[in-house]
Image (spheres, grey):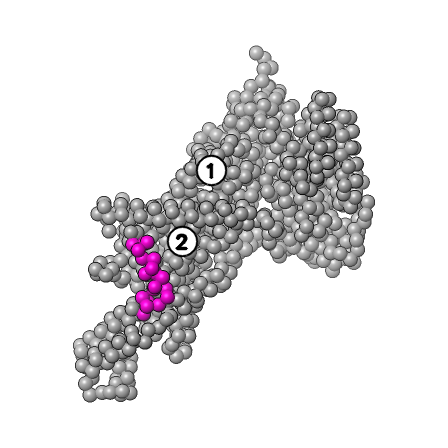
Amino acid sequence: MPGASQPLTDLAAGSKAVVAALKVAPEHKPRLMEMGILVGTVVELVRFAPMGDPVEIKVRGYHLSLRRSDAALVFVKPS
Amino acid sequence: MSEIKAGSVPYVALTGNPNSGKTTVFNALTGLRARVGNYAGVTVERKEGRLIWEKGDSAVSPTRDTPVIILDLPGTYSLSPQSIDEQVSRDILFHRVAEVPAPSLVVIVLDGSNLQRNLYYATQVIELGYPTLVALNMMDVARNNGHEINPEELSQALGVPVVPLVANEGQGMPELRRRIRDMATRGTKRTLPRTFCELPIPFGVEIEAVSALLRKNTPQRQTSADAEALLLLSDEKVLSKNTAHYGADLEKVVLQARQRLEAAAVEWRSVAIEARYARVAAIDQAVTTWVDPNRESFSDKADRIVTHKWWGSLIFVAIMFLMFEGIFWFAGYPMDWINAGVAWLADKVSSSMPPGDLNSLLTSGVIKGVGAVVVFLPQICLLFLFIALLEDSGYMARAAFLMDRLMSRVGLHGKSFIPMLSSFACAIPGIMATRTIESPKDRLATILVAPLMSCSARLPVYTLLIGVCIPAINVLGIFGLQGLTMLSMYLLGIVGAMAMAWLFKATLLKGEPPMLILELPPYKRPVPKVILRHMWDRSRMFIKRAGTVILGINILLWFLATYPKSPEISAKFESDRSVAAATVFPALQGAAMDKALADLQAKFAQPQVVTNSAEAALLGMFGGMEKQKQGEMLRHSFAGRMGLLLEPLIKPLGFDWKIGIGIIGSFAAREVFVSTMSTVYNLGESDEVTKDLEDTLRDQKREDGSTLYTPLLGVTLMVFYVFALQCVSTVAVVRRETNSWKWPIFQWAYMLVLAWGLAFVTFQGGKLLGLQ
């Protein structure tokens, strides 16, 4: 299904997408947004840590690391 | 609004995101002469210093001599705090910390290479309405990343002056200092109230209402009521955590306002964040020229390797290995010099004054006692140097990234790794580093286990015991057994900490696994001056301890080990001595006998002089008697009685009462064990040739004549030291950090139980296996 959103963690390392929805818990959501991850923001999945967790993403020009389980709640769609 | 009062010392708050180079800017403003303290009640570091005036600050202003105080606030992402660090920043900016005056100027440090997220916080602070100055840092990194920022346009967009900087090279610093001095002392008018987020109309209406109430409740305002109203409405936690400050009427008004907003389909939690980011992105677009948007930065390239699946892990292990190997190798030489210096000084002092109690106090209690601890200064300096290098280069964040998976296995997260690693140097900075951990339960769990990491104060104990007990042989041809033992002790501490963290997180501090939000900042070339300063600041704490706490404990221990004296024991040995002397010199008596014995002693000091065997045997007997006398005197002393009292408790661990004295002595500070042993075994020997403490210990025998310091005993004693919380400073910091006695007492108790239990298992298990 073209245009459907998928978890950020399903992206291949090195690819970019646009945030479509933030399905994280309400208490975590504001800080994630304050760090610049908003609906409509372009994010790049840079890499996974050696043991597959956490993930490193690039957002608004800087690098941020999130747990895989949290990043999986950020839904993205192709830009 | 009001003008800054003339006459009071201008107080400048320096704030900004973590990793924005704020500390570098602070150092350049205050010339590395900052005073580091703490805020009352929390261990968040309070760093402030006076603005310096340098020759390069060309434009001589008439206010040159006026003192200006710069306060470095902890790095902060937002005015809605998630950690204690951020809370302190917020409270100071809202002038809620009684001890800190309201700032007369706020300087915001912006990372030019990461403009949007930095502007998010900067615009929040500008909205507060203080006279504000923006220091636009890392212009070089931005340029290298392929974009140019126009400072004038940024200044227009923000409505406050902007000074471009490359702080770590000092570029722009004279201009920044001049602007700060001028703005802080001239009584700058407050900036006009402005806002950087266009909100939906219903939200605006609610802000009006809350703002009016705030103005009515607190007419004497330092900050814009509108900005505070916005935070109150959109940050869920701010009210629940400050009910006392705001009062019930305000809380009611805010809760009702949120209900109305929800009815109007306004997402009050996120709408302000979205609006602010929209504005910030527009500002970024307007002031930035992209020269080469696709350039890969140095950090990006470096991280391909440093955080690579295999290479990254390999590099991590290599760095840790290098760090610990380096500490032991490089420190060896200066340690030998210090040892030699201490021995020389003790001999000089001892020979320049008559023998007696004062002589003994100075040489055994003071010089050798403190010297035994100071000798570890090189190792501690190196450890702090490595940690400062890892922190300032940006590698610490990568280490946390690499280690998060392991830490999450025990319920902690990557951010706990930094406090744990710092605890290898000292649990105190380690515990203080926990303040960036957002979740209170995680923070507490990290605090509880941090002292299990083998800190630098254990190093003297391990080094001494390994030197005495563990033979210097190789296993499997290449690995030194002594080095392996040392490594095992460190590993034991790590495993213990992980196991306990897991246990605490599974029981006492059960909770949702916290969210990890970890920034990976660009790598930076560390500035040697700053690194050395870091190292020195922390090492100085150690020297101060050696000069105060440890010196005090040593003098007390010397007293306890010397008194009460027993005339009976002295008299008994004096008569034994005379009897023995009379067999060799039957004709001599009184003063003539003393002279003959002194001559004999002097003769033996020169090995080439051969004397008859009867005289040699006599001196040998005297030596043996002296040792026995000291042993009996010590047993008779306060310390000896305490050790004997403790003996039943530590006997199952294979320890004798002398080790008991060492353990008692080191309950306030572990490294005192070494100086205690030195005091306990060297008392009264100051008039003889100084013997190495290691040799002295190696000669110790049990009552049945077997060697006391066997490998098994050494390991058992070290295991005890790995787990026991013998450090008053740590207890005090934990008390301050957790704001109760409950946790430090709990921590002390669980670690003592663990220490005794595991030492028992080690010793008894070792004996069962037939080990020695």
Residue highlighted by disc 2? B459
**Residue B57 point in image, percent of width and height:** 72, 55
Apparent side of residue B572 relative to residue B533 in the rendered image (left or right): left
**Along the line of sight, the residue nearer the viewer: B264 or B12:** B264
Question: How would you rate the neighbour count of disc 1 (Cα within 10 Å): few for under 14, some for 14-19, many for 20 or more?
Answer: few
Give the numbered dot on residue B508: 1
Amino acid type, callout 1: Leu
What segment is highlighted magenta in the picture?
B633-651
Vertical placement of residue B756 versus B662, above or below: above
Q: Does the magenta stretch include residue B643?
A: yes
**Residue B377 point in image, percent of width and height:** 45, 58
Q: Residue at x 40, y 56 (%)?
A: B460
Q: Is mark 2 on a helix, strand or loop?
A: helix
Q: Is mark 1 on a helix, strand or loop?
A: loop
**Along the line of sight, the residue nearer the viewer: B40 or B401:** B40
**Along the line of sight, the residue nearer the viewer: B206 or B170:** B206
The answer to whether residue B645 shows anywhere in this view is yes
Question: How would you rate the neighbour count of disc 2 (Cα within 10 Å): few for under 14, some for 14-19, many for 20 or more?
Answer: many
**Residue A34 point in image, percent of width and height:** 64, 32
The answer to whether residue B173 shows anywhere in this view is no
Q: Disc 2 versus disc 1: distance between alpha carbons?
A: 31 Å
Q: Which badge, 2 or 1, comes first in the chain's sequence?
A: 2
Residue farthest along the front direction in this orientation: B248
